[in-house]
Image (cartoon, rainbow, N blue to C red):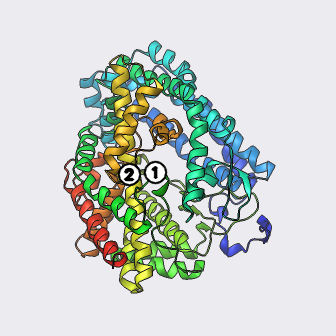
Amino acid sequence: MAQLLRNEVPEDLTWDLSTIFDSDSDWELAFAAVKQETEMLSRFVGHVGDSAELLQSALEADLKIERELEKVYVYAHQIYDQDTTNQSYAAFNSRVQALWAEVSQATAYFQPEVLNIPDDKLAVYLMTDGLKQYAHLFETLRALKPHTLAAEQEKLLAGVGDIFNASENTFGALDNSDITFGDVHTESGETVALTNGLYSLLLESKSRDLRREAFETLYDSYIGLQNTFASTLSSHIKGHNFLAKVRHYNSAREAAILPHNVPTTVFDTLSQTVAANLPLLHRFVSLRKRILGVTDVHSYDLYVPLVDEVDFDVTYEKAQEIVLAALAPLGQDYLDIVKKAFDERWIDVVENKGKRSGAYSSGTYDTNPFILLNWQNNLNNVYTLAHEMGHSVHSYLTRHNQDYHYGDYPIFLAEIASTTNESLLTDYLLKTNSDPKFQAYVLNQYLDGFKGTVFRQTQFAEFENWIHEQSAAGVALTADHMSTYYSELNQKYYGPDLFPDEEIAYEWTRIPHFYYNYYVYQYATGEAAATTLAERIIKNDGAEDYKAYLKAGSSDYPLNVILKAGVDMSQADYLKQAFNVFETRLNQLESLLIK
């Protein structure tokens, strides 16, 4: 069936971007206004610390431009994403990217000048009526002072930023464009060139021969370039360690995590608690071995579903009903926002020619949230709808309860809201459908998701920390050195029933997350916190606390914000509770599959 053209999509299945700007002409006027206001910022340069009044004026001028820029940006990128074949909107998107860089450069003066204000002088400024509301903002900014260099040094580092990103860019070019794989066979017997996308599909094939062929073919190419990938990764890690040293951090991990106002003990607690619960993952691998009927589980056996996909042909309209029912424990006020999203065209639903793939939640402080989908009538898309709605309601509540300067939330907290919705949906589906096959399918989906997010991302985080520490100690990150450790780490995580395939030792060569600078641990902490929160909400003792977290934005430090929801992420209890849920659902799946 041919894809719809954009102008063939029914209006009620598209998002309403006229709520941002009535027309492209209005966007052009707003774009021009941002450029003009940006040019006027130079009047504050060198004078931010002269008085409380000038400090406030400079801050509010920066915030005003940032706020207007975000609105211009959201319109441009969303109207482009709905049809990337439209060259006019491709130009909008390109122009707004350039404008963003221009504004960033024009506002770069502010932070160094604030940090140059003596502490006692700034404290007096912050007691004035106009600046009191920004106290937490300045507190977080001042925390960076010991790690901020002299203006000329900062300018020098900013000027060589592209050099520090060069290894990541090289990896991206190699992995996305230059590397080629051999031919493989598909389910239909056709011989085709292997791609990363096809690889993921073939690893879910019921044919073990196809899975093995795809696995070995893919890794032949990566192993052939192992020394090149070792060079790019080693150079990137050296850059992280260098920047941490010159900014006076004790480690690259500190330099990556502390600026987000999260203590590094959160990372340590995650690693230690996951390690203590690895027997649960070993049990899950053992169940896989039994159900697949194999002597050993190979790495290419880890992704084939243990339960055949259920016939769950669900329309978008039916999915809306399911999501509303699943999220009912969050209260009518939460559901009212979800209904607004459905009724007021916050969502771009169906595929059309040229539309960006995947799904996301977007929007900014002065717009409603928006959700991009590419709807298919299956259960996975119901989960996607619930997930993105979690982001959108989080954004809505934050923006309606915080002033602009606290009207966003950090990455550390972002995935908790979306994944909590997924957990609530899983609970609802298990309680409302008693068919054993359906229950087994949902349980398998949940356990695989937890495995991939909590266990696997923590494994990645542990490897990432190890290579930073090795490089900082002067150890050369050769392909052999990294592969030996990665193989041992992988075996530790998946346990004795996993066969130690030689190829998996080189998995590090193909993981882009190792270039993200201590990002992945947040996937694991977010999933665990969401699992724990959903359990509290289901037991009717956590919905109001949870919504207090959704409303808090960045008005407090991340751990204090999530504490409002009843989860102390400085301690291990939330992780232990999440593993209890994993174990309970593993018990349920074992009882359904083992007769």
How packed is label 2: few (under 14 Cα within 10 Å), some, or many (20 or more)?
many
Instruction: Name the side, left or right, on which 423 lies relative to 234.
Output: left
Would residue 54 be visible to someone looking at this image? no
User: In this figure, which residue is indicated by the disc labeled 2?
Assistant: 498
Which residue sits at x=33%, y=79%? 595
Would residue 65 be visible to someone looking at this image? yes
Dot 1 lies on which element?
Answer: helix
Of the pair 347 and 198, the residue shown nearer to us: 198
Dot 2 lies on which element?
Answer: loop
In the rendering, at what x and y percent does residue 368 appear? 54, 62
Q: Which amino acid, mark 1?
A: Ser
Of the pair 237 and 251, the residue shown nearer to us: 237
Q: Are marks 2 and 1 in contact (CB under 8 Å)?
A: yes
In the rendering, at what x and y percent does residue 61 appear? 50, 37
Which residue sits at x=31%, y=25%? 251
The image shows a total of numbered marks equal to 2
How packed is label 1: few (under 14 Cα within 10 Å), some, or many (20 or more)?
many
Instruction: Name the side, left or right, on which 418 lies relative to 353.
Output: left
Q: Given the current orientation, which residue lies at the most extreme front position?
A: 295
In the rendering, at what x and y percent does residue 257 appear? 34, 36
In the rendering, at what x and y percent does residue 472 appear? 35, 20
User: In this figure, which residue is indicated by the disc labeled 1?
Assistant: 299
Of the pair 40 and 360, the residue shown nearer to us: 360
Q: In which quarter of the image is residue 378?
A: bottom right
Of the pair 460 and 405, the residue shown nearer to us: 460
Relative to 21, residue 91 above or below? above
Q: Which amino acid, mark 2?
A: Leu
